[in-house]
Image (cartoon, grey):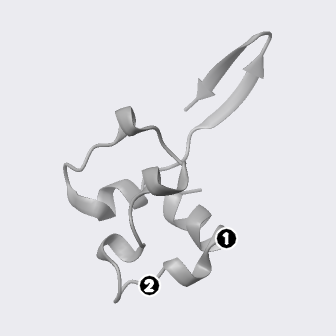
Amino acid sequence: MTFKEKLKQEHPEYVDNYKYAGGCRGCPHDYGYINEEELSCIGGCISCWTKQIPIIENIGSGRKVVE
């Protein structure tokens, strides 16, 4: 699932390819989907919104990101 698909599920009124840059209002950071440190505006809004959301598994007391 991409960040854009997640936003469409949670806030469909903020997804519009003609109204918003990258097809979505704001950026994934605005909705808590990524941390500010992960924010990279290189490539424009489309590159952020079309990224796959990593799957996070709980392992013991830590967390593991599964690619």
Residue 12 appears at what percent x and percent y? 60, 79
Question: In the shown orientation, is residue 62 left or right of residue 45?
Answer: right
Q: Which residue is mark 2?
A: 16
**Image quadrant assignment for residue 13:** bottom right
Q: Residues within 10 Å of mark 1 (few under 14, many from 20)?
A: few
SS at badge 1: helix
Q: Which mark is residue 23?
A: none
- The amino acid beneath tag 1 is Gln
Quadrant location, the C terminus: top right
Q: Residues within 10 Å of mark 2 (few under 14, many from 20)?
A: some
Compared with 64, 6 (above or below) is: below
Compared with 1, 64 (above or below) is: above
Compared with 32, 62 (above or below) is: above
SS at badge 2: loop
Residue 37 appears at what percent x and percent y? 36, 32
Compared with 40, 12 (above or below) is: below
Q: Which residue is mark 1?
A: 9
Residue 42 appears at what percent x and percent y? 19, 49
